């Protein structure tokens, strides 16, 4: 008996349901994808509301941001050159004093005795030479009395020997007397040489005594610790530099040894700022460039300085190079150790196109702005320059009296019809007053939009 193959049968109501759903979907899709021509034309003629601001031409400063810590023009820790007890402390923290001014006095009893001893020793050496003051180094010792006496003895012995030789030739004397005269001359000559050596030795001792006397005098001077005298004068300072006491390490009655610190001094006018600058700015930094600085202790106030020195080497670890900035501090408002933020002025442009930062549109590698052209928007390609808080410098074929569109750009294309809406009075319509650019190589930030 043959069996029939099984057939899957669907109910008729299910087939009719699928057909109904397909018909409805097709009708819906057809209705959504096809817009009537009048409706499309009305939509295209609808203007896009935008806000505008007038382009401005202003001067722009190109700057590089720097940060750092202020330090004194010179900072030195003054130490004692001699050991001793502190007799007087002449200054304290905050005092200002000129270079060379005394800071500390040590007791001078021992140094005074050593000075007197050196003076007496020199006098004794000069007395042995028959002198009252130290002669020149090429002094002839033949003028010394002891040497002159020995020389006279040699001359007398020479005369006696000549006389005995003449008498011997006439057989008027004995051989013994002749030999004695010869021995007397040799002894006199030896005594003369010995006298000259002794005089030279005494003269050398006198010179050594003079050196010891000078050392004793210097030791007496060193019992007064003084502020150093800098050999280099700051270029920013017209009057003589002065030190300020930033630390005192001793007290009266304290014993100090050679080299012990007693005071820490600082020249705080002018000040130095050593800042690290990225190596990409090497071509833009030059000596003499103006620098503006701000500190937290004086909000809203700026201080000026100038680039003094540039380190020729780049740090391979940080890829930065150091710039030294000199800052006049005549009013002593700035303090060494303070953290500062500054800007180095690298270029100045008198006439620059300034637009609000929100008016710049970037899309697909193209940077542009939209300007008002009648009742339409016109697209202008631009190049970005410097930027500041709320503003941006642009370069392009922008009319001098152009109205820059500042909002609604995401719906605009070249030739789009627009309508200008009024800006809320509380919202500024134009670009903010330009401030120095953060850096010439900084990438400006602006809202991206499809063009």
Image: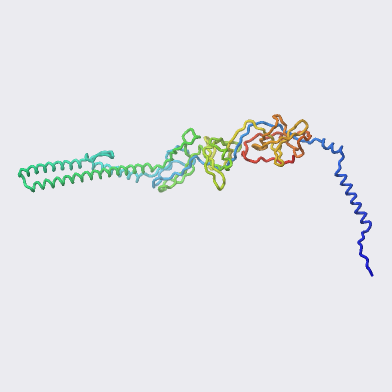
Q: How many marks?
A: 0
Q: How is the image coloured?
A: rainbow
Residue 195 vs residue 103: left or right?
left
- In this orientation, which residue lies closer to the viewer: 40 or 76? 40
Instruction: Determine which quarter of the picture holds residue 288.
Output: top right
Residue 400 picture location, percent across and down: 69, 29
Residue ID at (15%, 46%):
186
Residue 248 picture location, percent across and down: 47, 44
Quadrant of the drawing holding the C terminus: top right
- In this orientation, which residue lies closer to the viewer: 293 or 46? 46
Name the residue at the top extreme: 401
Residue 152 in view in this figure: yes
- In this orientation, which residue lies closer to the viewer: 25 or 7? 7
Instruction: Determine which quarter of the picture holds residue 306.
Output: top right
Name the residue at the bottom extreme: 1
Residue 53 picture location, percent across and down: 72, 33
């Amino acid at each position: 008996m043959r069996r029939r193959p099984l057939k899957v049968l669907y109910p008729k109501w299910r087939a009719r349901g699928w057909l109904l759903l397909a018909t409805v979907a097709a009708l819906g899709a057809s209705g959504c994808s096809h817009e009537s021509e009048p409706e499309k034309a009305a939509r295209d003629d609808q203007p896009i509301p935008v806000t505008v601001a007038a382009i401005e031409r202003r001067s722009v400063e190109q700057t590089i941001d720097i940060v750092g810590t202020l330090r004194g023009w010179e900072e030195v820790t003054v130490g004692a050159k001699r050991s001793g007890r502190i007799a007087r402390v002449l200054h304290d923290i905050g005092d200002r004093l000129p270079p060379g001014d005394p800071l500390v006095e040590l007791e001078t009893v021992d140094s005074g005795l050593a000075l007197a001893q050196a003076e007496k020793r020199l006098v004794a050496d000069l007395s042995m030479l028959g002198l009252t003051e130290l002669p020149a180094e090429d002094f002839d010792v033949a003028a010394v009395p002891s040497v002159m006496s020995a020389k006279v003895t040699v001359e007398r012995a020479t005369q006696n020997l000549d006389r005995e030789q003449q008498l011997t030739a006439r057989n008027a004397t004995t051989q013994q007397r002749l030999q004695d005269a010869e021995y007397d001359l040799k002894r006199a000559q030896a005594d003369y040489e010995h006298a000259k050596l002794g005089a030279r030795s005494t003269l050398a001792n006198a010179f050594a005594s003079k050196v010891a006397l000078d050392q004793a005098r210097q030791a007496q001077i060193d019992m007064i610790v003084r502020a150093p005298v800098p050999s280099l004068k700051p270029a920013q300072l017209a009057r003589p530099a002065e030190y300020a006491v930033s630390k005192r390490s001793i007290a009266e009655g304290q014993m100090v040894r050679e080299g012990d610190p007693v005071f820490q001094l600082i020249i705080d006018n002018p000040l130095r700022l050593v800042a690290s600058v990225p190596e990409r700015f090497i071509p833009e930094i030059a000596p003499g460039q103006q620098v503006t600085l701000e500190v937290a202790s004086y909000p809203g106030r700026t201080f000026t300085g100038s680039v003094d020195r540039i380190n020729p080497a780049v740090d391979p670890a940080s890829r930065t190079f150091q710039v030294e900035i000199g800052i006049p501090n005549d009013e002593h408002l700035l303090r060494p150790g303070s953290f500062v933020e500054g800007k180095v002025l690298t270029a100045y442009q008198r006439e620059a196109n300034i637009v609000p930062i929100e008016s710049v549109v970037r899309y697909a590698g193209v940077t542009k702005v939209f300007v008002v052209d009648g009742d339409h928007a016109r697209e202008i390609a631009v190049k970005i320059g410097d930027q500041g808080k709320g503003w941006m410098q642009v370069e392009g074929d922008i009319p001098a009296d152009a109205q820059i569109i500042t909002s609604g750009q995401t719906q605009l294309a070249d030739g789009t019809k627009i309508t200008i809406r009024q800006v809320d009075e509380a919202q500024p319509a134009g670009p903010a007053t330009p401030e120095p650019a953060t850096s010439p190589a900084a990438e400006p930030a602006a809202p991206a939009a499809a063009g």
